[in-house]
Structure formats: structure tokens, C-alpha cells
Amino acid sequence: MAFDFSSRHVFVAGGSSGINFGIAQAFACAGANVSLISRSADKVAAAAAQIQSLGVQALGMAADVRQPEALQGAFAAAAERFGPIDVLVSGAAGNFLARALDMSPNAFKTVVDIDLLGSFNVARLAHPHLRKPGASIVQISAGQSFTPTPYQAHVCAAKAGVDMLTRVLAQEWGAEGIRINSIVPGPIADTEGLKRLAPTDGTLDAMAQRVPLKRLGRIEDIARMAMVLASDWGSYVTGAVIPVDGGLALTGPRDFTAAAEASRQARV
Ligand code: HXC
Ligand code: NAP
């Protein structure tokens, strides 16, 4: 399936690496102008330069999704450069393995602030700049949203909130012609997120074997679903939470005890 996003404006929050950067690259290959934000000015500038090398325009800006003023400035600058936002990908996130009793209140709050409050900030502050009608918001969630997972209390709480936000905003913003959906990636190879949950070859193999399709996901698996949702092929889909996970959501809670121990030993 060939997608054409020529001259459309795609804004990716948390877009300087991993899955979100792969999504940005896929839209760029389909002709989109791309705006990216993340915390690190160097990382986001390098990511924007890589997008530009694909032959499209790109704007990289340092902004933390926990800082509304910085975000507001980034959305204004992006809209001035490329016009209204056609596709908003919201995927800034943080994670580490820890039991609830090993998390300080600030540790729990940090992940909730980035993943959940950050997603609200991104959607809320993008709203004035979204194309109406026609904009599509793609939230990048995680299976922890619906699978209660030890060592992941912060991410479970935050991503459950992200998906509820998807369902509420689909109703509040539907009349303006704005669609919003969540993609729930499975374990995606060669990403920071998976490295944190499966830090050794053993834990990585166990993860892949748990997936009904018996393989880790690829970044392009997620990028393709984002493009379907953002294109006319997804024009009657809103408020949906869609696993793209090889069937992992069917298998119940995972045991991260070995992975947590491996992470702890790597840190000492
Ligand atoms: C317990 C920890 C901890 C750990 C940090 N903290 N790591 N507590 N165990 N392993 C605590 C700190 O002690 C501190 O609490 C609080 O968390 C905030 O830490 P900071 O380092 O000051 O926060 P910050 O600089 O904002 O960094 C946020 C971060 C960091 C989440 C902690 O890891 C980060 O920037 N991550 C971004 C990259 C990332 O995680 N990518 C993966 C996304 S994948 P105190 O009380 O000491 O102040 C994902 C999961 C999806 O989201 C599922 C994948 C399958
Ligand atoms: P990643 O490479 O670490 O991506 C996270 C991105 O968010 C980076 O660009 C990071 O850049 C940015 N970011 C982090 N905190 C931010 C903040 N406060 N403000 C703005 N930007 C911030 O991780 P990934 O594994 O690809 O994960 C991407 C998304 O997929 C996340 O939403 C994650 O929950 C989800 N997911 C991943 C997997 C997986 O297997 N990897 C599985 C399920 C879900 P800076 O450091 O420059 O800020």
C-alpha cells in the first residue's frame, strides 16, 4: 500500500528516536513536512537533519512535554512554518523497571508526568493548530495500559490514562472533524523501550517466544498502522485502542523479575 502525504504537516512529539522517529521517517518518505520535538536539542536536531536528507522539509525543536510554555512555542513555530497540523503523533515516554515499593513518589510522578500529563499537554496545546476538519491524532500507548504488570505500576497507570484520554477526546473533538486513536505496540526490536524491559539475550528471547506470532515487532509495523489511521483508510476510525503486538495482548501479565534483576546488576 503506497501512502501519499505530500505537503501534509506531521508533528511528532517525542520524535527524536526509536518508534516515534521511525514513524516520522515513514511519513517523510510519503512526502510529509515533519516537525519534531524532544528534550535534547542535539538529538532532535540530528533527527531533523536525517529527515531532511529524505528530501522533505523538517523542523526539530527542543521542548519537554512537561513544560506547557515550551510546547506552546513549538506548536506555534511549527504551524507558522508548515501550516495547520494534519497528523499529530504523541509518543513521548519514559520507563524503568521497579517495584512500587522501590519507587519514590517522585519516581512514579515522573513517568505519569511524561506519559499521561505530557499526552494531555500535547493534545490540548496542539488543538488550536490542528486542521479542522481532517486532523488525525495517533497516541503511542503500551500493553501496560490494560495488562496489570508488576514492576510497571507507573507505566500501567499512565498508559491506562492515555487510552482513556483517547476515548474522551474522540467524543469531545469528533464534531470538529478531529480523529484520535491509540496504537499499542508490542515489543519492538532495537528500541530503548525494549532494552529497558529485556536487557539480556535471554530475556529478549523469552519475550519473543511469548508473542503468539513468535517474533519481535519492527518499527515499520507501527509506522504502517500510524499511516493507515492518519490516511483516508482510517477515516471512520476514532477512539480506538489498537494493539499492533503480534497477539501479545492475549497472553496476560509478564514476569519482569529476571529482567529487573539484570537491569539492577547492570547499574551496579
Ligand atoms: C527507581 C528510579 C529509577 C529506577 C529513575 N528513578 N530511575 N526509581 N528505579 N530504575 C527515579 C529517580 O530516582 C527520581 O526520583 C525520579 O525517578 C526521576 O528521575 P530523573 O532521572 O530525575 O528523571 P528525568 O531526568 O525526568 O528522566 C525520566 C526517566 C528517564 C523516565 C527517569 O529514564 C528517561 O528520561 N527516560 C526516557 C527514555 C525512555 O525511558 N525510553 C523508553 C520509553 S518505553 P527521586 O525521588 O530520586 O527524585 C516505555 C515503555 C513501554 O515507555 C513499554 C515497552 C515494551
Ligand atoms: P525512545 O527511543 O526512548 O523514545 C522516547 C522519545 O521520547 C525520545 O525521542 C525522547 O527524546 C522523547 N522524550 C522522552 N521524554 C520526553 C519529554 N519529557 N518531553 C519530550 N520528549 C521526551 O523509546 P521507544 O522504545 O521508541 O518508545 C517510543 C514510544 O513507544 C513510547 O511511547 C513507548 O511507551 C512506546 N512503546 C514502546 C515499546 C517498545 O517495545 N519499545 C512497546 C510499547 C510501547 P529525548 O530523550 O530527547 O527527550
Image (cartoon, helix red, strand yellow):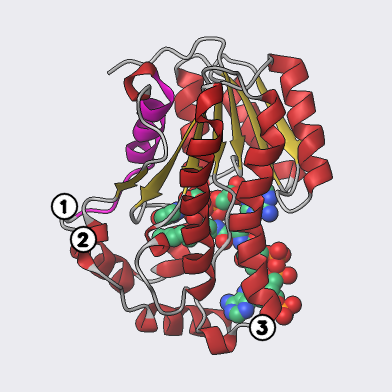
For label 1, being within 8 Å of ligand 2 is answered no
Q: Give the mark nearest the N terminus, 2 or 3.
A: 3
For label 3, being within 8 Å of ligand 1 is answered yes
Q: Which residue position is annotated with label 3? A: 104
Q: Which residue position is annotated with label 1? A: 213
Q: Callout 3: 10 Å neighbours few (<14), some, many (20+)?
A: few
* Residue depicted at x 81% and y 42%: 70
Mark 1, secondary structure of its residue = loop
Q: Residue 221: within the magenta?
A: yes
What is the quadrant of the C terminus in the image?
bottom right
Residue 21 visible from this viewpoint:
no
Instruction: Classify 48 as above or below 41.
Output: above
- Which label sits in the foreground, 2 or 1? 2
Q: Callout 1: 10 Å neighbours few (<14), some, many (20+)?
A: few
What is the quadrant of the N terminus in the image?
top left
* Residue depicted at x 69% and y 46%: 121
Highlighted range, magenta: 215-231
Residue type, numbered disc 1: Leu
**Position of residue 2 measured from the top left corner of the image (x, y, whole percent):** 32, 15
* Residue depicted at x 48% and y 53%: 164
Number of numbered tags placed on the structure image? 3
Q: Which residue position is annotated with label 2? A: 250
* Residue depicted at x 59% and y 49%: 92
